[in-house]
Image: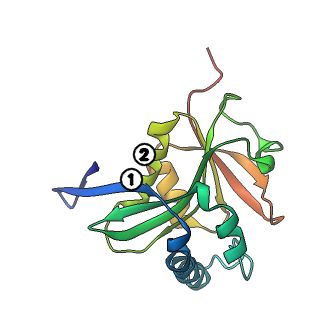
Amino acid sequence: YYVCLGAAGGKEWKVNMEIRKADRAHIDKIMSLYKEAKIFMDNHGNKDQWPVGYPSKELITKDIDKMYLCMYENQIAAVFYYAIEEDQAYKEIEGQWLNNAPYGVVHRVVSAHIVKGACKFILNWAYSQIPNLKMDTGVKNIPMQNLLESCGFKQCGKIVNTQGITCLAYQKGETNEI
């Protein structure tokens, strides 16, 4: 178990959350959360980041070994993809990455909105696994942009993702500068 500490409105809060690997038994719940997230994005001016049908059940099933759950009180608080791997979409960037070292990626982050701080907890957990992370998000995904910046990510430029959509590229890690 990991403990998430934070402060809001002058009050400190402490929440017990943990990260667990997802498995095939979680796929229907994961798909339900993605469906809710797509509706949220559509209703908040971000209709283009995830095309209709994305992510598909087939994709989640294929990626299940890299899917993780953020758990709070035995409930799924958030879902995400995490791996230490080279992302093909990150090979070409309009801009410049902070460094060229091996990195982790976090994709398809969604919250169930049952506890404050779940997505921040995910990003902090991922960074604790490898202190060099790359992510991307839609140009109109203001909530995710704000989250990434609040977690210390730097906007590095733009990439075109695997769906052919231009996204903002972010990285958290050391710079190449000496």
Marks 2/1: CA–CA distance: 5 Å
Q: What is the x, y in percent for residue 73?
A: 26, 67
Residue lying at 78% horizontally and 58% vertically, measured from the top left: 161
Identify the image quadrant of residue 35: bottom right
Q: Is residue 114 visible?
A: yes
Q: What is the x, y in percent for residue 178?
A: 61, 14
Residue lying at 81% horizontally and 42% vertically, measured from the top left: 91
Task: Name which residue type carries label 1.
Answer: Phe
User: Residue 173 shows which numbered tag?
Assistant: none
Which of these two is toward me, 146 or 88? 88
Q: What element carries label 2?
A: helix
Residue linked to disc 2 = 124
Q: Is residue 107 visible?
A: no
Q: Is mark 1 on a helix, strand or loop?
A: helix
Q: What is the x, y in percent for residue 127?
A: 48, 40
Residue linked to disc 1 = 121
Q: Badges 2 and 1: C-beta atoms under 8 Å apart? A: yes
134 relative position to 23: left or right: right
Which of these two is toward me, 29 or 176? 29
Q: What is the x, y in percent for residue 109?
A: 54, 63
